[in-house]
Image (cartoon, rainbow, N blue to C red):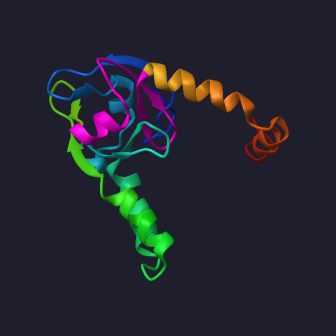
Amino acid sequence: MTLTKDTFIGEYSYSLDSKGRINIPAKFRQSLSEDNNNTFVISRGMDPCIYVYPLLQWQIIERNLRKLSSLQSINRTFIRNTARYATPSTYDKQGRISLSPYLISYAGLDREIQIIGMVNKMEIWNPDQLMRTDKSNISIDPEAYDDLADKITL
């Protein structure tokens, strides 16, 4: 549990069922504010993972996407790649949401999955892909990492 609503932290191991459903961790469901109507918006991540946003957070993203001019091709492409895979999903009585076959394939999900809290959203990963991504990020410039850490006062 976190101290503020719509905040997700921590890491959880779950399974993808044969119908493409996953359980949202109980702590994440408990931190979801009532204004979200038990609804998340699921979309393709920037890395090979799936993003899961609370409905209210997604509405902020939508407002920001509307501000981008579709006259510029980079904006059109960004909007297209953000919005085309987005799907609202209300979790059921067992706390499960459904993932589309495309997103399951995109993230390379098999049976075992990792769900990671990313403060304003969740990420769903294939554990092996997450490990490879973590290893490749070790090469991030330590000075750039320190500069970023200074900005948020770790």
Asked if residue 63 is positioned above or below residue 123 in the image, the reply reads below
Q: Quadrant of the N terminus?
A: top left
Left or right of 136, for residue 78: left
The spot of residue 34 in percent (x, y) is 29, 44
Image label count: 0
User: In percent of the image, x 41 and y 24: which residue is there?
Assistant: 126
Outermost residue to the right: 143
Outermost residue to the bottom: 71
Instruction: Compare residues 44 and 150 and report the one nearer the observer.
Output: 44
Left or right of 134, for residue 39: left
User: In percent of the image, x 77 and y 39: which residue is there?
Assistant: 145
The quadrant holding residue 149 is top right
The spot of residue 43 in percent (x, y) is 34, 47
Is residue 86 visible to the viewer in this orientation of the structure? yes
The range drawn in magenta is 101-126
Asked if residue 75 is positioned above or below residue 87 in the image, the reply reads below
Q: Is residue 122 in the magenta section?
A: yes
